[in-house]
Amino acid sequence: MKAATAAAKLEIYLPAAPEEFQRSTPTREELAALQQDPPAWLVELRKNGPHPRQVVAARLRVSTSGLARAGITQPLTTAEIEALQADPPDWLLRERRTFKDVRAQEQRLRERAAAEDH
């Protein structure tokens, strides 16, 4: 697989990975080995970042679209994410509410569909 695919599966920001990994084409077995016994660089990236958008969004409990609306287009480090969580700006509070509302609506639709199937 491509390095970008492997990075996505590992939930890391590819440009922050070692050059050797960026140029690699890991097999499924190699990817599984990285997941089972991550090397120090992978542990460090997962712990401190920079993190890709989907990880940033998950840690902030917002959607990736919410990040874009807020102008957050670059990867963030763990310290930057923690700073936003410690003193959430208005956009973060608003996007969290929106995300929560969307998830609740999706749950209601799933429940309705399940009830109609019975």
Image: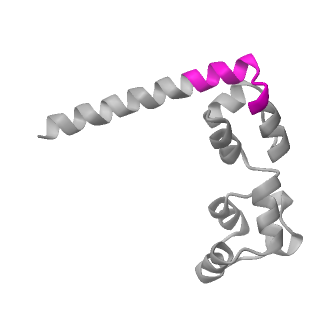
Residue 14 lies, in percent from the top left, at 78, 60
Name the residue rendered at 27%, 34% in the picture. Answer: 111
From the viewer's side, name the closer residue of 49 and 65: 49
Q: Is residue 6 above or below residue 68?
A: below
Viewed as shown, does residue 27 lie left or right of 47? left
Name the residue rendered at 57%, 21% in the picture. Answer: 97
**Quarter of the picture holding the N terminus:** bottom right
Name the residue rendered at 82%, 51% in the picture. Answer: 50
Residue 30 lies, in percent from the top left, at 66, 81
Span colored in magenta: 85-97
Q: Quadrant of residue 21?
A: bottom right
Q: Is residue 20 visible?
A: yes
Q: Is residue 59 above or below residue 5?
A: above
Residue 114 lies, in percent from the top left, at 21, 39
Name the residue rendered at 61%, 35% in the picture. Answer: 61
Q: Residue furthest front?
A: 86
Viewed as shown, does residue 82 lie left or right of 65? right
Q: Quadrant of residue 96?
A: top right
Residue 3 belongs to the span the image colors magenta:
no
Q: Is residue 23 visible?
A: no
Q: How is the image coloured?
A: one colour
Q: Is residue 77 above or below residue 45?
A: above
From the viewer's side, name the closer residue of 66 and 79: 79
Residue 44 lies, in percent from the top left, at 82, 63
Q: Quadrant of residue 19?
A: bottom right
Viewed as shown, does residue 87 lie left or right of 59? right
